[in-house]
């Protein structure tokens, strides 16, 4: 699968900008799943199957799997998405970043071991640190630009010669770093003003936007700030608000209901009456 082609097709075919984040926390699982072997896989698979027709992508966050020694369940989950929902791209959220020789290993982990279609990467070690990921020409490389957490301003807002660091990063990535067309950026929904600025600086580059739902970001402000002229360009992520919408045996249906509402709330702003 070519990530950018698959993403464009998913935006159109599913009429959705929603990315469901898969952040499985066993302490929040419904009682009937707790303590079961492979509970993480079972939980995430149920969410995936209940929401697959509503999303443009899934985003498993690797920390939730690694913390539980559940990397094999992550591998099985991504294999399940590829097999049962083959048109939906999978973004592995790992925020990797290191010198080139180590980045090569991270790229092997993400793209050969886990078979993700895209990976989140921390770009602050510079261009050479992202080249090993770019070597996988059909994969998406999604670079942190303006993160959703309040402390993101500590560094990303520093003035670097008349512009803010996140603005410099957006210009660099959309220009020189993106010659192969594989790059996208992370910009938090908690900062719609910066979404608008990044959109201005990057043309139609896809923006992964976490921060609606549990973090309180505003859907309407996000969509208005970040949609391209064709009404897409955004992967708006929600994790906890969807995953833990219910905590009974019908948790997947509860998740689906919130995912439908979220997708529809996004679409209502994309296509104003
Ligand atoms: O700036 C960022 C970058 C990544 N994230 C990740 O997105 C999800 C958000 O989860 P919610 O439950 O919807 O708040 C999570 O995996 C983060 O690691 C982010 O929030 N902000």
Image (cartoon, rainbow, N blue to C red):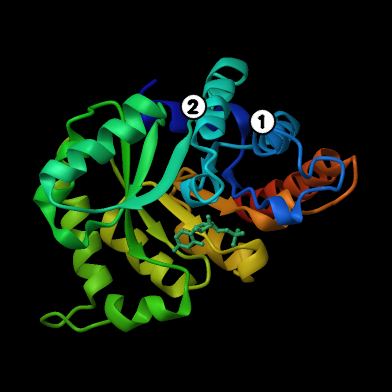
Few, some or many residues within 10 Å of mark 1 (<14, 14–19, 20+)? many
The image quadrant where one finds the N terminus is: top left
Where's residue 107, x and y in %?
Answer: 26, 36
Would you place residue 16 above or below residue 222 in this image?
Answer: above
Whether residue 195 sits left or right of residue 112 in the image: it is right
Please name the residue shown 83% across and 47% down the image. 30
Q: Which mark is residue 9?
A: 2
Provide the residue designation for mark 1. 52
Disc 1 to disc 2, C-alpha distance: 14 Å
Where's residue 158, x and y in %?
Answer: 23, 83
Please name the residue shown 47% across and 65% down the image. 188
SS at mark 2 in the image: helix
Where's residue 45, x and y in %?
Answer: 68, 31
Few, some or many residues within 10 Å of mark 2 (<14, 14–19, 20+)? some
Whether residue 34 sits left or right of residue 211 in the image: it is right
- Closest to the observer: 91 or 101? 101
């Amino acid at each position: 699968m070519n990530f950018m082609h698959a993403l464009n097709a998913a935006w159109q075919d599913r009429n959705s900008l929603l990315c469901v984040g898969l952040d499985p926390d066993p302490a929040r699982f419904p009682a009937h799943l707790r303590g079961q072997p492979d509970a993480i896989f079972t939980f995430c698979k149920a969410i995936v199957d209940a929401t697959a027709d509503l999303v443009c992508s899934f985003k498993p966050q690797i920390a939730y799997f690694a913390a539980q020694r559940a990397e094999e369940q992550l591998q099985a989950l991504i294999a399940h998405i590829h097999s049962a929902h083959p048109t939906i791209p999978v973004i592995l959220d790992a925020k990797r970043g290191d010198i080139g020789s180590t980045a090569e290993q991270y790229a092997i982990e993400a793209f050969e071991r886990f078979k993700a279609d895209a990976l989140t990467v921390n770009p602050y070690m510079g261009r050479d640190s992202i080249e090993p990921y770019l070597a996988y020409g059909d994969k998406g490389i999604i670079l942190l630009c303006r993160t959703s957490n309040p402390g993101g301003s500590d560094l990303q807002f520093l003035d670097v010669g008349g512009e803010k660091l996140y603005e410099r990063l957006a210009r660099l990535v959309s220009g020189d770093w993106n010659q192969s067309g594989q790059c996208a950026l992370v910009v938090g929904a908690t900062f719609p003003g910066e979404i608008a600025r990044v959109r201005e600086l990057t043309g139609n580059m896809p923006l992964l936007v976490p921060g609606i739902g549990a973090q309180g970001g505003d859907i309407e402000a996000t969509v208005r700030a970040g949609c391209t002229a064709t009404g897409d360009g955004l992967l708006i992520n929600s994790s906890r608000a969807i995953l833990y919408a219910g905590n009974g045996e019908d948790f997947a249906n509860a998740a689906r209901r919130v995912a439908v509402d979220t997708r529809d709330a996004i679409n209502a702003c994309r296509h104003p009456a």
